[in-house]
Amino acid sequence: MESSRTALESWDVHRIVRNMFPLLVLLTVIVLIAGITLEDARGLLDEYGLLAVMVPTMVGMGGNLGAILSSRLSTRLHLGTAEFDPRDRELWANVLAVLALGVTVFTTLAVGAWLIGRVIGSEMALDVLLAISLSSGLSIVVVAIVCSFAATYASFRLGVDPDDTTIPVVTNVVDVFGMLIFIGISSIVLSP
């Protein structure tokens, strides 16, 4: 593998494709797991249609929040201002900002789904939707945070530009875990 300095200072198309193609093939296979999980949860989603409405936002926003954090970490690494030190206040500020965004987005998702339910005549209570949305959403955000740190740090240490790898890795891994978490928590909350 190239040294960190060489890999991070060059914009070679061939190097980017050589690094990314196998990764993207692997990530494609991994994302199939999310699709299989969604197919396995068809009964739950048929019974509670509002959950099906929530799936794209739930899974997409988890990956987006992870991508935001990965991007910020990559930028700090390129600028030489990140050290992955637990005492780094700016790292914690970024983590707290992503968590705050998660609370806001997933609360809004629950309220939006409830409003849609009122229009179409669904009988899911707001407190149930909030419990599902916030517990699964914040769990997904925690996975996104961990994955963002791991992908950014690993890419940098391996001499691969984190800008090339972190966002595809984070969004795909969070999609899979997000689907598993959302379906699992929905099943638990809605079980009689």
Image: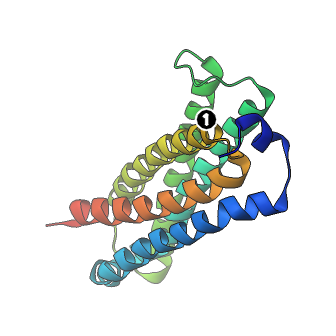
The image position of residue 90, as x and y in percent, is 65, 23
| Residue 46 against residue 80 in the figure, above or below | below
Q: Residue at x 48, y 41 (%)?
A: 146
- The answer to which of 169 and 107 lies nearer the viewer is 169
What is the residue that sits farthest to the top in this orientation?
87
Q: Residue at x 56, y 44 (%)?
A: 148
The image quarter containing residue 15 is bottom right
Q: Is residue 2 left or right of residue 63?
A: right
What is the residue that sits farthest to the front in this orientation?
1
Q: Residue at x 65, y 68 (%)?
A: 21
| Residue 72 against residue 30 in the figure, above or below | above
| Residue 35 against residue 87 in the figure, above or below | below
Q: How is the image coloured?
A: rainbow
The image position of residue 96, as x and y in percent, is 56, 31
- The answer to which of 45 and 129 lies nearer the viewer is 45
The image position of residue 99, as x and y in percent, is 53, 39
Q: Is residue 27 left or right of residue 39?
A: right
The C terminus - image quarter:
bottom left
Q: Residue at x 49, y 57 (%)?
A: 174
The image quarter containing residue 125 is bottom left
* Residue 61 visible in the current orientation: no
The image position of residue 77, as x and y in percent, is 72, 32
* Residue 133 visible in the current orientation: yes
**Label 1: how many residues lie within 10 Å, few (<14), some (14-19) or many (20+)?**
some
| Residue 50 against residue 163 in the figure, above or below | below
Residue type for callout 1: Ala
- The answer to which of 103 and 184 lies nearer the viewer is 184
Label 1, secondary structure: give it.
Answer: helix
Q: Which residue is mark 1?
A: 97
Q: Is residue 119 left or right of residue 9?
A: left
